[in-house]
Image (spheres, helix red, strand yellow):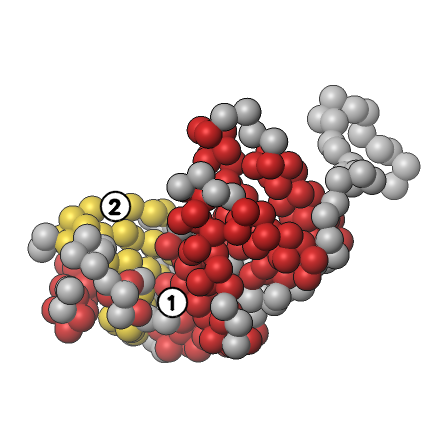
Amino acid sequence: MPDVRGAVADARALVAQWFPEARAAWLGGSVVLGSATPGSDLDVTVLLQGPPAPFRDSRRYRGWPVELFVHTETSLGHYVRRDAEGGRPTMARLVGRSVVLTDTDGSGGQWQQTARMLLAAGPPALTGDDLASMRYAVTDLLDDVTHAHDAHERLVSSALLAEESAHLLLHGAGHWWGRGKWVARELADLDERDGTDWRARHERALVTAAAGDVSLLLGFADDVLARNGGPLFEGHRLAGNDPGAPADRST
């Protein structure tokens, strides 16, 4: 288990060495959240006045793999808002649930507080075409799993169904969602909030699906759909864009 104090000291040293002009910097990610493993990296967000920001970079420092997220004021605001609007608050979490490494002008504390308030507010409601598209995706994957031609098709379709149904469950419940390990973490947080057992059900569904029994996974997805308006196939329609169509000059 990585040492948190050592990680903070190393992160602070790398900011001083690589970004002496930084207005602010934060250490976020697993090391700060208490879920670090021996393979965890340092997730460091840096606020600069201007160029060369914004950019993302991967390096090593004192034996640590380091993920750098280097921003200006406007680019940081853009990515925080973009992630939040999509229901997956990666940038807001890296700043809001962080240790401030440097703060020359008060922006470190201000951005941390802004991100914390955004995280506490939760994602925008899932409605309209967004909700319909997610219901359609889960419905379609249910059919793929049910009628798969062979075990390999069934397994890869099951993995997608497990992820998409968890996404619909979380976002439909007004909760942040995530990918990979964050699926399990967000489901656990939803259970704590609502007194449910979705994470355990999701885990059992994945384990049994990998062994060839998809019944629990199908039941999980059916229950998620029932909470969010039911299956959707017939009548699902989305307008498209044709870049070759003449421009509308009526306005």
Residue at 61% from the left image edge and 31% from the top image edge: 147
Q: Quadrant of the C terminus?
A: top right
Residue 148 against residue 208 in the figure, above or below: above
The disc label shown at residue 104, or none: none
The residue singled out by tag 2 in the image is: 58
Report the front residue among 154 and 65: 154
Name the residue located 67 percent from the left edge and 43 percent from the top edge: 139
Amino acid residing under circle 2: Ser
Horizontal side of 96 relative to 248 (left or right) equals left
How many C-alpha atoms fall within 10 Å of the one at disc 2: few (<14), some, or many (≥20)? few
Query: Quick one: SS at disc 1?
Result: helix
Picture quadrant of residue 238: top right
Residue 120 sits above or below residue 19 on the image: below
Residue 156 percent coordinates (x, y) = 46, 34
Classify the position of the N terminus by image quarter. bottom left
Q: Which residue is mark 1?
A: 95
Image vertical order of residue 165 relative to residue 9, above or below: above
Farthest-out residue, left: 62
Residue 100 visible in the picture = yes
Q: Position of residue 143 (x, y in %)?
A: 64, 36
Assign a secondary structure to mark 2. strand
Toward the viewer: 167 or 27? 167
